[in-house]
Amino acid sequence: MSADTTAAGFPALFVANPHFSDSVNRNIIGSEIEGGVHLGDLAPGSVLSLRTMNHVYRVVVLGPETVLISGHPELCPEPAEVRILGSTWGGSMLKTRYLGFGMHLEFEHPVHRTILTSRIVDIRTQA
């Protein structure tokens, strides 16, 4: 049994943090319900199609926080190696190395610095 599972093998439920505001706790719980992808759970070479409100990105996993990303006509028309910081609800709080439905992806681009996408609406694995 790990810290992420119960004795019965079910995922452990999030317990609201008394030091966070109600809205932050709601966002965290919402991200657990809506789902997403933890980069650390993906093998190198895994390919994702990530659709935001404005663009469809192709993401090839290189490591636990490094990917090749393409799909933005100006920022990454060709695959660029970037560091995934995580997903955010639009503020300063970041769920690290996580791609979450309804959240904004944040990554570090070698030329354009920190990029924040529009909201993620779909994530699919590709063969």
Image (tube, rainbow, N blue to C red):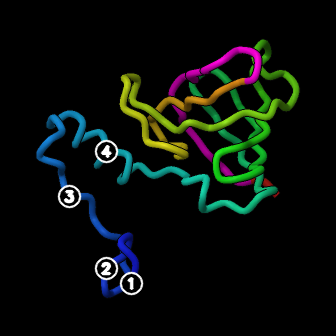
Amino acid type at circle 3 is: Val
Tell me where residue 37 appears, x and y as whole percent: 55, 52
User: According to the image, label 1 marks what residue?
Assistant: 1
Q: Measure how far apart labels 1 and 2 are at the Cα level.
A: 7 Å
* Dot 3: element: loop
What segment is highlighted magenta in the picture? 110-125
Q: Disc 1 or disc 4, which is closer to the eye?
A: 1
Whether label 1 touches label 2, CB < 8 Å: yes
Residue 54 versus residue 59: which sits nearer the camera? 59
Give the residue at mark 3.
15
Tell me which label, 3 or 4, sits earlier in the chain. Answer: 3
Image point (29%, 39%), residue name = 27
Residue 72 appears at what percent x and percent y?
75, 21
Instruction: State yes or no: discs 2 and 4 in contact (Cβ < 8 Å).
Output: no
Q: CA distance from mark 1 to mark 4?
A: 23 Å
Which residue has dot 2 on it? Answer: 6
| Mark 2 element type | loop
Q: Name the residue at the left extreme.
A: 18
Residue under numbered circle 4: 28
> What residue sits 35% from the left and 72% below the top?
3
Left or right for 53, reference 73: left
The CA distance from mark 3 to mark 4 is 10 Å
